[in-house]
Image: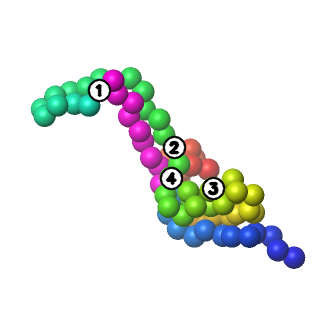
Amino acid sequence: MKIFDIIAIGAVLLDINAQVERFPNIDDEVFVPELKMTGGGSAANMAIACSRLGLKAGFIGKIGNDANGEFLK
């Protein structure tokens, strides 16, 4: 009996993306009205992509025991 089609082993990362109205110039500051946090990492992204293609995918990785780790769970 097959439980998974694929198991990814590797890093899971926290991506933090800043939404800005324009790119800053040299020695310039730009207001950041919104930050988006999303899960990332090549192994985790590959597992998600396989799952979206209809495969039964699993992921093995290590996360910290902190707020970022809780977010990634």
Tell me whether circle 1 and circle 2 mark residues in contact (CB < 8 Å): no
Calculate the distance from the C-alpha at mark 1 to the C-alpha at mark 3: 31 Å
Query: Which image quadrant for residue 30?
Result: top left
Is the N terminus in the top left, top right, bottom left or bottom right quadrant? bottom right
Extent of the magenta region: 13-21
**What amino acid is labelled 2 in the image?**
Thr
In the rendered structure, which disc, 1 or 3, sits on the residue that comes first in sequence? 1
Magenta-drawn stretch contains 46 = no
As drawn, the residue found furthest toward the left would be 27
- Residue 65 lies left or right of residue 26; in this view the side is right
Name the residue nearer the viewer: 23 or 11. 23
Tell me whether circle 1 and circle 3 mark residues in contact (CB < 8 Å): no
Q: Residue at x 42, y 42 (%)?
A: 16
Q: Main secondary structure of the magenta part?
A: strand
**What amino acid is labelled 1 in the image?**
Arg
In the rendered structure, which disc, 1 or 2, sits on the residue that comes first in sequence? 1
Residue density around tag 4, few if under 14, some if 14–19, many if 20 or more, within 10 Å: some
Calculate the distance from the C-alpha at mark 2 to the C-alpha at mark 3: 13 Å
User: According to the image, label 1 marks what residue?
Assistant: 22
Q: Residue at x 45, y 46 (%)?
A: 15
User: According to the image, label 3 marks what residue?
Assistant: 48
Secondary structure beneath dot 2 equals strand
**What amino acid is labelled 3 in the image?**
Ile
User: According to the image, label 2 marks what residue?
Assistant: 38
As drawn, the residue found furthest toward the right would be 1
**What amino acid is labelled 4 in the image?**
Gly
Q: Residue at x 56, y 44 (%)?
A: 71
User: According to the image, label 4 marks what residue?
Assistant: 40
Tag nearer the camera, 1 or 4:
1
As drawn, the residue found furthest toward the front would be 53
Calculate the distance from the C-alpha at mark 4 to the C-alpha at mark 2: 6 Å
Q: Residue at x 76, y 69 (%)?
A: 4
